[in-house]
Amino acid sequence: MLIGIDPVISPELLDVLFRMGHGDEIVLGDAFFPGDSFNPRVIRADGITIPRLLDGILSLINLDKYVSYPVVMMDVTAGDRLDPEVEGSYRAVIEKHWPDTPPVERMERFAFYERCKRAFAVVMTGETRTYGNVILKKGVIPLVKGM
């Protein structure tokens, strides 16, 4: 444990967040997401919901302000129903840390999977709500004056 770092951030996740450069993406996959099929760097965060994990992650990194959509979620497949509460719960955490973040981009399922293959890492969470997968694009961390 470290002072000031949320305990939902495992040593492996902390290492990945540190190693990511600006513009790199991290996928937070729901409990059913086929993360190991899409990316060689998979971190387990079983039992932790995505809003809870987002809160820990977004206290350590910022989102890319130089792109139109630094947050991407999977679009609903024809015939399925989208629960707006899922995105709403994510948005509440995003607004808490980075209030000027643009709206979430929705991406077709298979295009989303392709994008996950290029992500820096995938975090497998305990999120059980459908269409809960989300991609975050890391921004440029501002330097503290005098450092």
Image (cartoon, grey):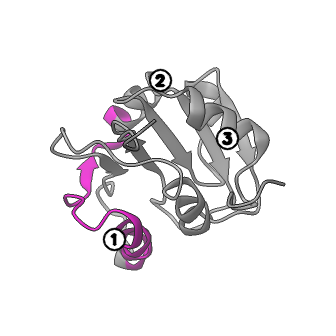
Residue 43 in the image: above or below residue 76: above
**Which residue position is annotated with label 3?**
14
Q: How many marks?
A: 3
Magenta region: which residues? 85-111
**Which residue position is annotated with label 1?**
95
Residue 86 in the image: above or below residue 147: below
Please give left or right for residue 139 compared with residue 130 in the image. Answer: left
Where is residue 35 shown, x and y percent of the image? 61, 35
Q: Is residue 34 visible?
A: no
Is 110 part of what is drawn in magenta? yes
Ranked by sequence position, the earlier of labels 3 and 2 is 3
Residue lying furthest right in this view?
1
Measure how far apart labels 3 and 1 are at the Cα level: 22 Å
- Pointers 2 and 1 in contact (C-beta within 8 Å): no
Is 59 part of what is drawn in magenta? no
SS of the residue under disc 1: helix
Q: Residue at x 59, y 45 (%)?
A: 33
- Check disc 2 and give the amino acid type: Lys
Please give left or right for residue 145 compared with residue 6 in the image. Answer: left
Ranked by sequence position, the earlier of labels 3 and 1 is 3
Residue lying furthest front in this view?
146
- Check disc 1 and give the amino acid type: Glu
Residue 139 in the image: above or below residue 86: above
